[in-house]
Image (tube, helix red, strand yellow):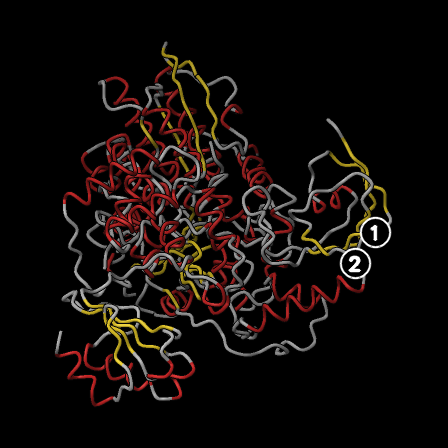
């Protein structure tokens, strides 16, 4: 059975590891400290890949499955890193009826990743969202806060090429 | 103790303060149905089958709701019966219903409840089902989440009884499923193969890998010579599959059934349990006399061996180098027995019937091929044997009591108690005492190491030494004991069994439903059968087994000889807890 490994190679630094281990050492003996430790780990690394969860498990003695169970239960945790450019395609009602799902499909096709994932080079991450408050411009997507409105599928390759 | 009074279904009940409604009801002999509840380890009110109605109209889960003074509770009102039926129908809406072919059919807790609660429309709430996969990556078992009802019993035994914790609930809401971290297969984790999760699963979601077809094929292959061995604890549980009370010793009927199934020789693992005592006892004496590594820790339980390798590798040098009785048996069958009988060892198929699922993994370990061939070819659980007997339409209950075949069917009382926690220790001490003291042991019933407590200790005076021994069963208890040893406590000899209560409660034994597990100590009942079996045998010390004596005289030489080491001893490998194989 294949493991759901992260699509991006892990690039943790010794400094990050040191910071996490120090945080765990300070917190681990307090009851109920597992959540704060996992939150701290996400704060340091930005996400919770198997390498980071293994570190938490090894340092706390908590089985990695319990950590993974928490990481997949709460929406605040992510197993995938955010890319240098974060693409967010609106699937709210107005954008949806104007064909934003076709835009999303096109991005998925070009980048080879699914919503919630990051390209292996760490450049783009892709998400869908519900209404960015620009329904008049539907369909809409944002890349690092920059809004692209009245999109057509044909425009997508050109926009991505700018980054 | 402070008590309170309440009324359940109109019956006055007095119970200790702090009891749950479920516990109070039991005192009044009112059985509230449960599905997720496992006493002490899984009291989470998840399945909502145990709902009851209070006089104020509230519906609460009785397994977690505290009983209060003056409370009035209704456990079988029309409203409650309707609730339970609906809950079952909702569970069925996300359950792959293939009861006709399900391995658990006929003794499935979900099926039984549906029948009792009168579920007439099983498809009432059918709709989308949670996507699920079949995990067969582990050597010993399969997880089929399409039949999982998320009761979390398996999660509870894995983490709390076994201190392993490789399974848990992932994701949330409708997507929730029981699995391992990062959707790894169980075989890629530090699972110790103990199978305790299978024992407590209420449905057919968890089951052992079944090799009964392969064994039927071998039996029917005229080119093969098929030898079967049965572990001590199997005889204390097999009868349950045929309606006999828990703790009925069916040794004689079991031997008769195996013969009718067509095995060429029906042997007993008791033989190699005695052999284990000769080798391990000798190893213990040598370590004590030569300043070897102590405490010596037993190595019969492959679940425990897996646990030690992954979770306490610093104790690998303490492990006895002896193979388990299952493997010793195979090695002797394919060497001594084959040569004695003039049978080509290549033609021998060695089958074992075990109370254990970890044995399926053990036979694939390195260094388990004493005669140059795998010691054991197929290891079946007690459940698989019951399945074979039923498939062959053998009327088990009508069978006469028969004995085992010679020469590897000979076993002593010391061997048969291997199946209960403390049994290996008791058997070893009976022999070690007599070897060192050169005189018979007074009372050979060493009751200090008997009983189902998780950790037992005793001091036995042997040859002027106060021998300190300890016994642990269930790997969570092993963890507690080993941490004490790490902290400096001194022991000479430690017995560890992977499953709580030892092999009698092994992961391959006949499954007993939660309502039985919660109310009777099945470990004690099955162990009692073994201790009675021991008491009724003419020979009760391993070194008195005449066939074992003959084996040493004709073939192995002395215990611990070069030849004995070649055939009967093995090696271990250190692993890490988080060591993932992708």
Nearer to the camera, A120 or B226: A120
Q: CA distance from mark 2 to mark 1?
A: 8 Å
Q: Position of residue B467 (x, y in %)?
A: 38, 17
Q: Chain of mark 1?
A: B
Q: Which residue is mark 1?
A: B9
Determine whether, in the image, residue B358 is placed left or right of residue A111. Answer: right
Q: Which quarter of the figure has residue B105?
A: bottom right
- The kind of secondary structure element at disc 1 is loop
Residue farthest along the top direction in this orientation: B464
Q: Chain of mark 2?
A: B
**Pointer 2 or 1: first along the chain:** 1
Q: Position of residue A50 (x, y in %)?
A: 26, 54
Residue B513 vertical position relative to residue B319 in the rendered view, above or below = below
- Are there few (<14), some (14-19), or many (20+) residues within 10 Å of tag 1? some
Residue B73 vertical position relative to residue B555 in the rendered view, above or below = below
Q: Are marks 2 and 1 on the same chain?
A: yes
Exactly how many numbered labels are in the figure? 2
Determine whether, in the image, residue B305 is placed left or right of residue B520. Answer: left
Q: Which residue is mark 2?
A: B76
Nearer to the camera, B535 or B467: B467
Determine which of the numbered discs, if any, sits on residue B191 in the image: none
The residue at the point 59 percent across, 63 percent down is B108
């Amino acid at each position: 059975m294949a493991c759901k490994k992260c699509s991006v190679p892990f690039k943790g630094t010794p400094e990050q590891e040191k910071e996490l281990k120090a945080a765990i050492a300070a917190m681990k003996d307090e009851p109920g400290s597992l959540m704060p430790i996992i939150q701290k780990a996400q704060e340091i690394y930005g996400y919770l890949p198997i390498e980071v969860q293994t570190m938490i498990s090894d340092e706390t003695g908590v089985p990695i499955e319990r950590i993974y169970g928490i990481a997949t239960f709460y929406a605040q945790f992510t197993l995938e890193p955010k890319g240098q450019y974060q693409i967010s395609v609106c699937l709210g009602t107005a954008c949806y009826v104007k064909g934003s799902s076709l835009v999303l499909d096109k991005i998925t096709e070009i980048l080879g990743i699914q919503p919630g994932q990051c390209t292996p080079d760490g450049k783009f991450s892709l998400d869908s969202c519900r209404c960015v408050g620009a329904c008049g411009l539907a369909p809409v997507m944002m890349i690092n806060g920059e809004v692209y409105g009245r999109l057509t599928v044909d425009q997508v390759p050109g926009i991505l090429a700018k980054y | 103790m402070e008590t309170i009074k309440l009324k359940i279904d109109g019956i006055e009940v007095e119970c200790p303060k702090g009891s749950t409604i479920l516990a109070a009801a039991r005192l009044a002999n009112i059985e509230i149905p449960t599905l997720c509840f496992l006493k002490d380890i899984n009291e989470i009110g998840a399945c909502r089958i145990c709902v009851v109605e209070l006089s104020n109209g509230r519906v609460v889960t009785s397994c977690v709701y505290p009983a209060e003074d003056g409370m009035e509770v209704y456990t079988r009102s029309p409203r409650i019966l309707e609730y339970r039926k609906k809950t079952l129908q909702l569970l069925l809406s996300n359950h792959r219903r293939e009861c006709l072919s399900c391995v658990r059919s006929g003794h499935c807790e979900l099926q039984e409840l549906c029948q009792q609660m009168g579920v007439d429309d099983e498809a009432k709430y059918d709709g989308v089902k949670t996507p699920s996969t079949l995990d067969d990556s582990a050597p010993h078992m399969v997880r089929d989440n399409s039949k999982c009802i998320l009761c979390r019993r398996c999660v509870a035994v894995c983490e709390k009884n076994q201190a392993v914790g490789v399974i848990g609930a992932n994701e949330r809401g409708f997507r929730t499923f029981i699995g391992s971290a990062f959707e790894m297969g169980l075989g890629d984790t530090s699972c110790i193969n103990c199978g305790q999760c299978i024992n407590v699963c209420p449905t057919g979601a968890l089951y052992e890998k079944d090799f009964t077809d392969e064994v039927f094929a071998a039996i029917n292959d005229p080119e093969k010579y098929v030898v079967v061995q049965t572990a001590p604890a199997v005889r204390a549980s097999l009868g349950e599959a045929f309606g006999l009370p828990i703790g009925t010793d069916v040794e004689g009927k079991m031997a008769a059934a195996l013969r009718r199934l067509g095995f060429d020789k029906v042997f007993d693992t008791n033989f190699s349990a005695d052999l284990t005592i000769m080798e391990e006892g000798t190893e213990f004496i040598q370590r004590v006399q030569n300043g070897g590594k102590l405490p010596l820790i037993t190595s019969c339980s492959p679940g425990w061996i897996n646990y030690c390798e992954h979770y306490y590798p610093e104790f690998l040098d303490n492990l006895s180098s002896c193979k388990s009785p299952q493997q010793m048996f195979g090695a002797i069958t394919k060497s001594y027995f084959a040569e004695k009988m003039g049978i080509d060892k290549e033609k021998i198929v060695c089958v074992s019937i075990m109370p254990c699922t970890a044995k399926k993994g053990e036979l694939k370990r390195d260094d388990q091929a004493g005669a140059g061939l795998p010691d054991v070819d197929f290891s079946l659980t007690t459940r698989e044997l019951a399945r074979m007997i039923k498939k062959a339409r053998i009327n088990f209950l009508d069978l006469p009591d028969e004995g085992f075949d010679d020469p590897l069917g000979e076993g002593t009382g010391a061997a048969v108690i291997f199946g209960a926690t403390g049994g290996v220790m008791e058997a070893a001490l009976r022999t070690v005492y007599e070897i060192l003291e050169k005189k018979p042991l007074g009372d050979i019933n060493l009751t200090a190491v008997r009983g189902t407590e998780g950790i037992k200790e005793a001091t036995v005076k042997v040859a002027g030494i106060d021998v300190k021994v300890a016994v642990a069963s269930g790997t969570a208890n092993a963890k507690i004991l080993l941490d004490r040893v790490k902290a400096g406590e001194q022991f000479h000899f430690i017995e560890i069994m992977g499953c709580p209560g030892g092999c009698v409660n092994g992961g391959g034994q006949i499954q007993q439903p939660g309502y039985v597990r919660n109310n009777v100590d099945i470990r004690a009942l099955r162990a009692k059968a073994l201790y009675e079996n021991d008491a009724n045998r003419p020979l009760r010390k391993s070194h008195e087994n005449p066939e074992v004596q003959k084996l040493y005289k004709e073939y192995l030489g002395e215990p611990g000889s070069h030849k004995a080491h070649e055939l009967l001893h093995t090696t271990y490998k250190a692993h890490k807890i988080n060591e993932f194989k992708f």
